[in-house]
Amino acid sequence: MTSNLSATPAAPLRGRTALVTGGGSGIGRACARALADAGAAVHVVDRDGDSAKAVAEETGGQPHAVDLADAAALATLPREVDVLVNNAGLQHVAPITAFPPDRFELIQQVMVTAPFLLLRHTLPHMYAGRWGRVVNVSSVHGLRASAYKSAYVAAKHALEGLSKVAALEGAPHGVTSNCVNPGYVRTPLVEGQLQDQAAAHRITPDQVLTDVLLARSPVKRLLEPEEVAGAVLWLCGPHAASVTGVSLPLDGGWTAG
């Protein structure tokens, strides 16, 4: 495995290039910031071009306004990437019998097919350089199921399997692949769920948080995006060179029970 000669303990990713999907907000924005602070040049990919541009300006990176459901658009992204963070996602809540098939398909395209295509796109560069880090932002729902989230749970379980295959194939080339598995994180996606479920159940958003979203979590609080980004950064650092093929829960003890 080659070393990064320009890296320092304060900037362990100096000389590396990272690509973060869903980088315009929430966990993706926190990851872009953390990777940039560690010295990486960051490509910020988001469907919302204005958000991607804002984060890129903040981190000294490059913005890319790309719809991850568009395979042709993915091919326009840079190939020379050392760190790939597959983070983008979306949610739809409905029973299987009422779940819109087109919505189910879209969620698989964004959260499974796009990570697969990005791996095909960037792994040759990582292999050639004998170094690479793939971090897939999965979820506790990649390890557990919840009712009414068939598309999301199916996608996250598929991402877990894809990550493990990438770990096995990448190991001879100095490339690791791992998942981080947060519970509920304070993001626009979750804030929207709080409001929607409060209206549906006719309770307050605070009651939704404690009685619905965090019902199975011993730690009764939302994660902050920066906590997830810290785990992502650690998996890219020098102390995690032999950590591959794992799923790292950040779930407040949800999966302990």
Image (spheres, grey):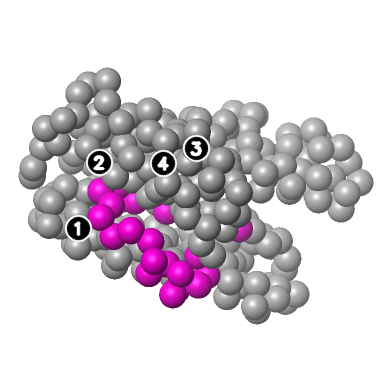
- Sequence-wise, the earlier of marks 4 and 1 is 4
Q: Amino acid at mark 3?
A: Glu
Quadrant assignment for the N terminus: top left
What label does residue 16 carry, if any? 2
Residue 82 showing in the rendered view? yes
Of 57 and 124, nearer the camera is 57
From what the image shows, is residue 116 above or below residue 61? below
What label does residue 57 carry, if any? 3
Where residue 236 appears, as percent x and y from the top left, is 28, 38
Q: Amino acid at mark 4?
A: Gly
What label does residue 61 carry, if any? 4
Residue beneath disc 1: 125
Q: CA distance from mark 4 to mark 3?
A: 6 Å
Magenta residues, as a range? 68-90
> Is the Cβ of the residue at disc 3 closer than 8 Å to that at disc 1?
no
Q: Which image quarter: residue 217?
A: top right
Residue 251 showing in the rendered view? no
